[in-house]
């Protein structure tokens, strides 16, 4: 959970709750780490991978639009997203 939290810049306790919800939905599963049984790994299920692929393909237009932006415009989008995330409550 710490590694996932670090990737998303979040607190591990928040990530644990989100992973628990993904478990309930059948989108991920917890597995024992083969090198250390005390450690749990999170892996997407077939259902989770399928849903993820569907979500990515439904947003291909966004990559296309963002790919046409100039450097200044990309910085503007980054700033706007930072502002939105900062006020996420």
Image (spheres, rainbow, N blue to C red):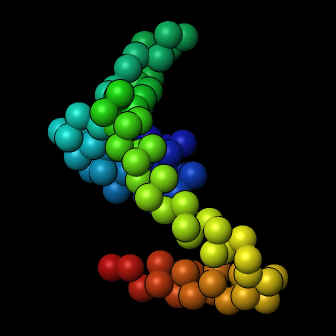
Q: Nearer the viewer, residue 60 or 71?
A: 60
Question: Is 52 on the left or on the right of 82, as rendered?
Answer: left
Q: For residue 38, say whether it is visible.
A: no
Question: Is 14 on the left or on the right of 72, as rendered?
Answer: left
The percent coordinates of residue 45 (x first, y second) are 35, 28
Q: Nearer the viewer, residue 71 or 17?
A: 71
The percent coordinates of residue 14 (x first, y second) are 34, 56
Residue pictured at 62% horizontal, 65% vertical: 63
In the rendered image of this protein, does residue 81 appear above or below residue 25? below
In the rendered image of this protein, does residue 65 appear above or below residue 80? above
Residue pictured at 47% horizontal, 84% vertical: 84
Q: Nearer the viewer, residue 81 or 9?
A: 81
- Please, which residue is most extreme toward the top here? 34
The percent coordinates of residue 72 (x first, y second) are 79, 89
Q: For residue 52, say whether it is visible.
A: yes
Residue pictured at 63% horizontal, 75% vertical: 65
**Quadrant (top left, top right, bottom left, bottom right) of the C terminus:** bottom left
Can you tell which quarter of the image residue 49 is in? Answer: top left
């Amino acid at each position: 959970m710490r590694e996932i939290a670090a990737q998303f810049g979040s607190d591990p306790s928040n990530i644990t709750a989100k992973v628990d919800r993904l478990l309930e939905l059948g989108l991920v599963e917890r597995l024992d780490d083969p090198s250390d049984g005390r450690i749990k790994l999170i892996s997407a299920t077939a259902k989770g991978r399928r849903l993820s692929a569907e979500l990515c393909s439904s947003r291909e237009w966004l990559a296309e639009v963002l790919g046409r932006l100039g450097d200044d415009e990309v910085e503007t989008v980054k700033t706007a997203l930072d502002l939105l995330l900062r006020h996420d409550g």
